[in-house]
Amino acid sequence: MTSDPELTRIVRSWLEDGVTALPDHVVDSVMAQLPATQQRRRWLPAWRDLSMSTYARLAAAVAVVSILVIGGISVARPGLIGGQATLTPTSTASPATSPSTLLPIAPAAWCQYIDHINALTPTGPAFDALQAARLGQLDEWRRLGPEILALGRQTRSTLAELEGLGPVATQVAREAAAVDAWVAALEASFAPDAGVSDIDRIFATYDVWLTSRFGFMNAMQSNFETACP
Amino acid sequence: MNTAVVIQAQRGDEEAFGHLVAAVGDRLHAVAQRILRDTDLAEDATQQALLAIWRDLPALRDPERFEAWSYRLVVRACYVEARRERRWAPNLTLLADAHRAVPDSSGSIVDRDQLERGFRRLSVDHRAVVVLHHYLDMPLEEIANALGIPAGTVRSRLHHAMRALRAALDADARQPAQEVAR
């Protein structure tokens, strides 16, 4: 940070100069384009803007990836999951409304995370439970971990169903590899001699997954929009 | 900011969105103009930011944060415009405004000229931090939240930018205005 009061004064004064009013033609142009500009569906979060805490992202990823994959399958292969041919907003609202076999963590143990700036409201395992694990309460982690692991494995299994599906095949393969690494790290954390560092490794692996997931999400979103105009 | 209006706009109410544009449009445009230092680019960036606001508004969970969120989108639009149009040379209108005939409280003509040149050498990342902090008076933490970057990064960028501006002011040689416009 600068501690140059004279420079600060000069810069502030300099910035005060210049146009401030938004020209009418810009406003008119924006308003004219509104009818043709579709608003983002509330149930499609702004993933590109993700900047949650690591723990919240971990929980959110488990939930949202699974839900989107389920939706993707239901669109790509009608009847494969619960006979759903289309993805509806309510199917992404909470774990309680998703197929129970893919969400082994009881709905009561889940909560909604809110990221105000990024307008992201994923649902996932309660933050406190995960944070407790990070603080060294490995017993708690081991209690909760297997359920998360089961969900990770289920996600991986579900991804396998998507492999080879034309337009998203590449993204699915990349996503599957990242999930594999993450699940492997999860499994390592349940070893008898596992420690907090193992949990840290999980999150490091998870970050790789998170990065790879952006392309996957975009592809899946396009898939939804094509199948559900 | 009237959160009820934000909520109405989130539901697709174009009239409500018009009220939002009236409320924040000038400020967004002022920020864009100061970051990009080009009136045309700033208008394009503001327009794109407003359309992005309309498009993404339903995903904004806390209407109270609308304004901070809108700054993020306008800065992002500035990145896009800066990349799309590599024309950083100032237009004549801006130069005429920047080179006043008489010194004022903000410093001499030379200061303004050198500031302009120094500022243009900064990346959009650095410009955005300077503008949000010194023009909008946003605290560093708030800037970090608005831009989605760590507070330490904001502090570092601001430090670097201000140091560069100080160096520009301290420069002995001053180029003619014609060279700036080139």
Image: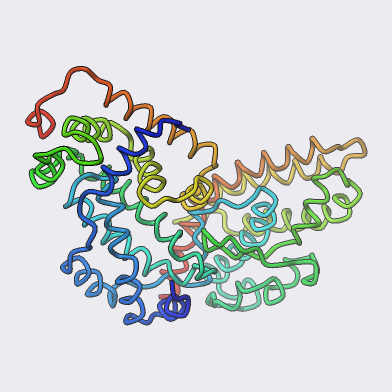
Towards the viewer: B163 or A174: B163
Residue B133 in percent (x, y) is at 41, 46
Q: Position of residue A226 (x, y in %)?
A: 41, 69
Point 21% across, 17% down: residue: B172
Q: Quadrant of residue B9?
A: bottom left
Q: Farthest residue in the top direction? A: B172
> In the image, what residue occupies the spot 63% across and 55% down?
A160
Give percent across and percent down for residue A227. Answer: 44, 72
Across and down, in percent, residue A199 comes to 78, 41
Task: Name which residue lies at 61% across and 59% down.
Answer: A65
- One can see residue A188 in this view: yes
Residue lying at 46% horizontally and 57% vertically, measured from the top left:
A219
Pick whichever, A53 or A191, lies toward us. Answer: A53
Q: Is residue B88 above or below residue B65?
A: above
Asked if residue A170 can be seen in this view, the reply is no
Quarter of the view holding residue A78:
bottom right
A225 vs A164, left or right, is left
In the rendered image, the vertical position of residue A128 relative to residue A135, given as above or below = below
Q: Quadrant of the C terminus of chain A?
A: bottom left
